[in-house]
Image (spheres, helix red, strand yellow):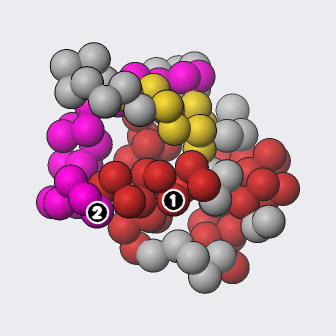
Amino acid sequence: MDYIEHINGFLKLAAKDARLYPTHISLYIALLNYWENNNFDNPILLKRLDLMAIAKISAKATYLKCIKELHNYGYIQYDPSHNSYRGTWVYMVVYGQVSELAMS
């Protein structure tokens, strides 16, 4: 996985995707950082509060809205646990697959 290529590809898509706002982009970059720290293994286990701190998102409602929208738009696969002690699983979609899914 080429980290820089993935970021550049995502940012090109984000520039064309009118549905994405700065909070979506910030959250995606934070997710990408988690993914890199886990050697690009899928899925990655997240802790909401940690991810919110990295993405500079202060409201839980904003975080939930953005992560669900990233899922609905095809940028990630989000599998919530609804248990704050267990964490949430997220599957990062490989860039070549994002371009096909996200813009539909």
**Circle 2: is it few (<14), some (14-19), or many (20+) Cα within 10 Å?**
some
Residue at figure coordinates x 26%, y 38% from the top left: 48
Question: In terms of depth relative to the viewer, which is nearer, 21 or 96?
Answer: 21
* Residue pictured at 49% horizontal, 43% vertical: 32
Residue 41 appears in the rendering: yes
Q: Which quadrant does the C terminus fall into? A: bottom right
Tell me where residue 17 appears, x and y as whole percent: 65, 76
Q: What is the number of the mark on residue 55?
A: none
The local crowd at label 1, few if under 14, some if 14 to 19, many if 20 or more residues have their Cα within 10 Å, is some
Q: CA distance from mark 1 to mark 2?
A: 10 Å
| Residue 16 belongs to the span the image colors magenta | no
Q: Quadrant of the N terminus?
A: top right
Q: Is residue 41 above or below residue 64?
A: above
> In the image, what residue type sits under mark 2?
Thr
Q: Give the residue type at disc 1.
A: Glu
| Image-based side of 21 in relation to 96, left or right | left
Query: Does 94 appear above or below 37?
Result: below
Position of 58 compared to 46: left or right? left
Identify residue for label 2: 62
Nearest to the observer: residue 69 or residue 82: 82
Secondary structure, mark 1, is helix
Residue at which label 1 appears? 69
Q: Position of residue 50 (x, y in %)?
A: 21, 38
